[in-house]
Amino acid sequence: MYIRPYPFIYIPIINIIPLEFGVLLTELTLSEDQPVALRQMTAVLLRQYVDVHWNSGAEKYEPPETTPEAKAAIRKMLPEGLKESISKVGRSKLRFSSY
């Protein structure tokens, strides 16, 4: 039986990393040079980051809120991912484009 050893251990670190972390996660998710597993993991982390830090009115919100500049950068990058040939990564990006 295969057990993923570390990905979920690092999830709480999202709350202590600078707000540009969302931009970094987006860049990694979109990077075709990275392994698919890493890109899928960064897509999950990006989703969690958006759920927690995107909007102060959100149910799961925790400060700090993502800056308008970081939100604009992420929104600008995400449509590029819609042409992704790997469906699991592409579907993850499609979900974020609605924010």
Image (tube, rainbow, N blue to C red):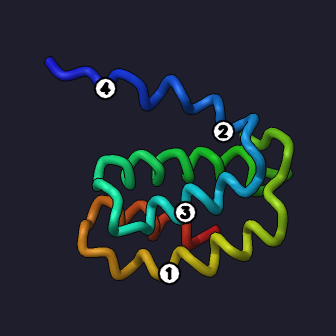
User: Residue shown at 34%/69% (left/top)?
Assistant: 32
89 sits to left or right of 53: left
Q: Up-down: is 70 above or below 19?
A: below
Quadrant location of the C terminus in the rendered image:
bottom right
The residue to which callout 4 is attached is: 4
- What's the amino acid at mark 3? Thr
Q: Residue furthest front?
A: 33
| Residue 60 percent coordinates (x, y) | 72, 40
Quadrant location of the N terminus in the rendered image:
top left
Q: Earlier in the sequence, mark 1 or mark 2?
A: 2
Q: Residue furthest top?
A: 1
Answer whether labels 4 and 1 touch (C-beta < 8 Å): no
| Residue 35 percent coordinates (x, y) | 29, 54
Q: CA distance from mark 3 to mark 4?
A: 22 Å
The residue to which callout 1 is attached is: 79
Disc number lying in front (3 or 1): 3
Q: CA distance from mark 4 to mark 2?
A: 19 Å
Q: Earlier in the sequence, mark 3 or mark 2?
A: 2
Q: Up-down: is 54 above or below 72?
A: above
| Residue 73 percent coordinates (x, y) | 68, 74
Please name whichever residue, 6 or 55, is drawn nearer the observer in this view of the structure. 6
Q: CA distance from mark 3 to mark 2?
A: 14 Å
- What's the amino acid at mark 2? Ile
Answer whether labels 4 and 2 touch (C-beta < 8 Å): no
The residue to which callout 3 is attached is: 26
**Secondary structure under badge 4?**
loop
The residue to which callout 2 is attached is: 14
54 sits to left or right of 47: right
